[in-house]
Amino acid sequence: MVENTFFILLNLASAAALLIWSVRLVRTGFERAFGGQLRRWLQLSTTSRFTAAGCGSIAAILLQSSTAVAVLIAGFMSAGTINGIVGLTILLGADLGSAIVAKLLNSSLSLVAPVLLLGGVITFLRSARRRPRQFGRIAIGLALLFMSLDLIRAASRPMIESAQSQSVILYLADETAAAFLVAALFAWLVHSSVAAVLLFVTMAGQGIIPAEAAFAMVLGANLGGSFIALVLTLKSGVMVRRAVLANLILRGGGAAGLLYLLSVVPELSGYLGSKPAQQALNLHLVFNATLLLVCLPFVGPLFRAVSLIVPDISAEAEAAARGTALDPDALDHPKRAFSCALRELVHIGGRVEAMLRNVLPLYSSFDEMAAAAIRAENRDVAQRSLKLRIYLASIRGNDSEDKIGTRAIELAGIAANLESAADMISRKMVMLAETMSQENLKFSNDGWKDVTGFHDTVYRNVQLSISVLMNEDPSLARMLVEQKEIVRDVAQRLEKQHLYRLKEGLSESIETSSIHLDLLRALKAVNTSFAMIAYPVLSDSGELLGSRLAAN
């Protein structure tokens, strides 16, 4: 009996693991195929609150995750291209989008799943182009998702009539608060509220958990799902943390309030459908739709209220933690010393990333204090870069001098490139913003869209570069070099578009022509400096032939 129970639980756990993995597979496929377009689309979805909420919903449907949308807009909010109120609106829309996803995916498509799996595998293996391969990944993920739901249903059938299951059902029906908290914890652990909801709904449909427990667990998944984004953005800027915390309070608090309302007025569940699984799914969808509609007119006051919990950061706090990762005691041990140097490089890269993020708002509203902070950061980066090069030159040990010297030269070159990028931001880009402010100039609407879009592209590549620096992953390094070529082509296209606007005689384009072109070239130079991080990784892995990438 014990052995049978163990195998039943093992099969159920493995089916749940496949469900979690398949949801992630679909999300990463969409991110890799359409990540850039989604980011651009979300960035431009600020014309109204309804537009922002709608774009957030659609993005969550495509990415199968409201958390993924939260991570996307965190970059925009940090860069100042999306304000906190719009960010909160997009998050509320994304919550509704994830509920729609759960509703759409909760169907057993026994005929479609094999077709999706076969077509996905063939597309992924036979295609050499990046986007078709991601279409194959998405198809494989959807097929595995539908199959995992069938596996959960099959694995759970023997549990329905067992005495142990009946006792669990009775406990969950009585202790809905415990079910709510367990579900929230589970959704956070698996980092997917969609997967958690699908699992709970499927179990409710099989009779493993009663309707009351299913309601509590689906609502608990809403709390856990919103908590995921909070954890992932703990080190982000103040605006990001305020928007994510506001979403957590509204979604998590609303879910707890609705759970209490259902315990007081249980007959409300009768309006949600006739079967437990259907009722739980409809509850999930109605809750998120109602939350969006109720909160949409008040997102401004709600966001400002959270500022009482997340206050502005003082200058002293920002200046804290300026220590160094360079350990003098590790100089006689090359592996330890290079590890210290690498950590310092990642820290420097993060500082330059923050400089790039903070410079763009200066073009819409110049702030001398913000400009001075960027200049101060540049001086600190230069000092750190010099200390790092001196540290690298002092490394000694039992390894061959050639091996130590080669690695030291690679890391010193990266430090010099990061310093060059910081200097370009501090001297060139801040100076251009200051000139615009002094001469009271303003980009045309199309020109500003070009600048913000190109800045976002470069900013994403900077983040990718830091990931390459930390992980030394050849596939990420190859992607970074490919992005370098894309940035070059985009810069050329944007320069042509600017010349067309000059030909049309737009006064704003004529007045800001030199600044516009210089800013595009400065951003391109920053991108090039960070892209150089990829070449040592590709060279070590044998994927670099001369000055060109090796063929797949």
Image: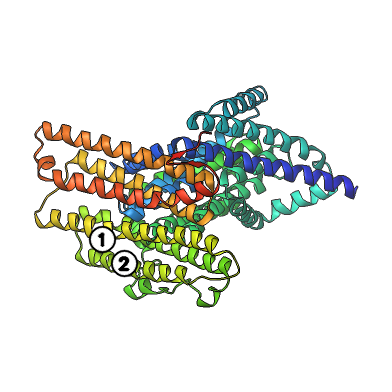
Q: Position of residue 315 (x, y in %)?
A: 32, 73
- Give the amino acid type for the residue marked by disc 1 in the picture: Ser
- Give the amino acid type for the residue marked by disc 2 in the picture: Glu
Front residue of 386 and 94: 386
- What residue is pinned by disc 1? 426
Q: Position of residue 113 (x, y in %)?
A: 64, 26
User: How many numbered discs?
Assistant: 2
Q: Are marks 2 and 1 in contact (CB under 8 Å)?
A: yes
Q: Is residue 183 left or right of residue 286?
A: right
What kind of colouring is applied to the model shown?
rainbow
* Above or below 543: residue 117: above
Residue 126: quarter of image: top right
* Above or below 200: residue 414: below
Q: Residue at x 65, y 55 (%)?
A: 182
Front residue of 451 and 14: 451
- What residue is pinned by disc 2? 377
The secondary element bearing badge 2 is classed as helix
The secondary element bearing badge 1 is classed as helix
Q: CA distance from mark 2 to mark 1?
A: 8 Å
Q: Position of residue 358 (x, y in %)?
A: 30, 58
Nearer the N terminus, badge 2 or badge 1?
A: 2
Residue 413: quarter of image: bottom left
